[in-house]
Image (cartoon, rainbow, N blue to C red):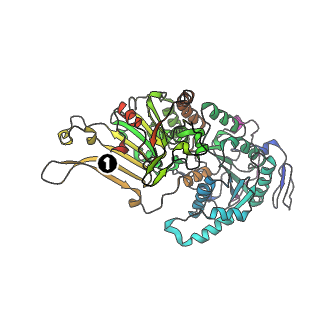
Amino acid sequence: MAKVFSSFHVENFCFTRKLTILPNSPHFQKWVPNIFSRIEPRNHLFELRSSNGYPLNAVSLQDEGSAANPLVQEVDFPEFEKGDSTLSITVVGASGDLAKKKIFPALFALYYEDCLPENFVVFGYARTKMKDEELRNMISRTLTCRIDKRENCGDKMEQFLKRCFYHSGQYNSEEHFAELNCKLKEKEGGKLSNRLFYLSIPPNIFVDVVRCASTKASSTTGWTRVIVEKPFGRDSESSSELTRCLKQYLNEDQIFRIDHYLGKELVENLSVLRFSNLVFEPLWSRNYIRNVQFIFSEDFGTEGRGGYFDHYGIIRDIMQNHLLQILALFAMETPVSMDAEDIRNEKVKVLRSMKPLQLEDVIVGQYKGHKKGDKLYPGYTDDPTVPNDSVTPTFAAAALFINNARWDGVPFLMKAGKALHTKGAEIRVQFRHVPGNLYKRNFGTDLDKATNELVLRVQPDEAIYLKINNKVPGLGMRLDRSDLNLLYKARYTREIPDAYERLLLDAVEGERRLFIRSDELDAAWALFTPLLKELEERKIAPELYPYGSRGPVGAYYLAAKHNVRWGDLTGEE
């Protein structure tokens, strides 16, 4: 080992000021997630509390290294003193919309709230030719500051942008990733380096990027983690193949499969509401709950994303991941602890207990053109990027069932659609009728109006409210259905963090609770793949519904079949 004082790249060596040359050995070219588990991180800034409320070490303590990859073995490195660690975040696909609109703003928000370590840099990587200053100009247009801390916004933004750099390269070029590695090492300045790669790119190039990064740009002194965006395949086979290919270069505990809905405030609060409130936990079963509804709606169409969307459809885009993950969190048994593996174990049990989806329990729809006033709204197939004969659903509703003692016979209804009358996402829990209700005469023949309903509105205007029956003031006995309402913006003055902020911080901290494990993914695809194949092989024609409507009529009949009314269509909201 020798000291060098200039910065250049020759094959597998990166020579940088104040750095020690690392030998050309395969052990140093593989991802080494766990070899420092015995080294106690001394940088206090890496002891941030992540979403489970507990401080976490910067180095993963879950040891799968040697078993998963025989080339990963323990290597002796020197101890690092306080302040000698760095965090390098590389956004692969930095010129794309997701990076500009979500990832860079989330990173700035974390910096703004002092949630990132003192020594960190952000690199953008993409094929687009760009200089550092051009990247900074591009992302500065999307950065915003917290409402309650605007006085130092300009200074914070300038400081953050100074830490942002750019490297242009091909996604399948080991040479270009080796050049990125040199730049990272130069910024890291000889400190213990922890590296996080965010793959904001199409799934067909995930493996190329991981291969190049693993062999040429992984950390040799700290941890390396990779955040992977959905979609995770199109079905069980493609998802399994993607996982197999990623695991040629990564261990499972280095892969962070992100589903941003799991980072939303109300989804996070779901387990708190259930497990820390005695009033709810005893009711959380088939004995008291009549049905549960997971509803997602958008008031716009594909809006230029028709080509991408037509390859996946609403079931893959929303139901198989966002809504199914929320369902698993809702229905799981009480975990042993708040540890990530304990929670994910319970979620997998729910998914594996679910009854296979039948075509008769599913309705698919597709929006058509509609004229409202003087404005003409185009249909799905009017999009020039969509084939005229496309039968890809833009709306789907499904009834699912969990075959276990807690939920036997309870319908879990999902509904997701584009170009509907409103935009929102919510969870609705409809309780059973009160046995022998003394006041049933006051409700007339519609006993559904007499039942309680718990609603968690995920977006917009986050809220939790419980529909109860009470007496209207006066001399007579007239009953009314009212809400006990917790509206977040009225109760809490702090701005609610974006889901990407929470998930990025968790990835930095090594907290995996809100990320999807490979066996969860397998169980989710096993549930939906047979249905998707049947829909595509039989070319089931979707029911058409007008742009801006409440969706296809078939969704009403599906709910009625299971003695359910959609809670968002009662007219009481």
For the stretch drawn in magenta, the main secondary structure is loop
- The residue drawn where x is 62% and y is 54% is 97
Whether residue 70 is in magenta: the answer is yes
Q: Quadrant of residue 67?
A: top right
Residue 506 in picture, x, y percent from top left:
58, 50
Residue 465 in picture, x, y percent from top left:
35, 50
- The residue drawn where x is 60% and y is 51% is 509
> SS at mark 1?
loop
Whether residue 370 is in magenta: the answer is no
- The residue drawn where x is 56% and y is 55% is 501
Q: Residue furthest front?
A: 374
The residue pinned by badge 1 equals 572
359 or 158, nearer to the observer = 359
69 sits left or right of 380 in the view = right
Report the amino acid beneath label 1: Glu
Residue 93 in picture, x, y percent from top left:
68, 51
Q: Residues within 10 Å of mark 1 (few under 14, many from 20)?
A: few
Residue 49 visible in the snapshot: no
Relative vertical location of residue 54 with respect to residue 329 in this rendering, above or below: below
328 or 175, nearer to the observer = 175
Relative vertical location of residue 16 with respect to residue 272 in this rendering, above or below: below
Q: Quadrant of residue 5?
A: bottom right
Q: Which residues are magenta?
A: 65-85
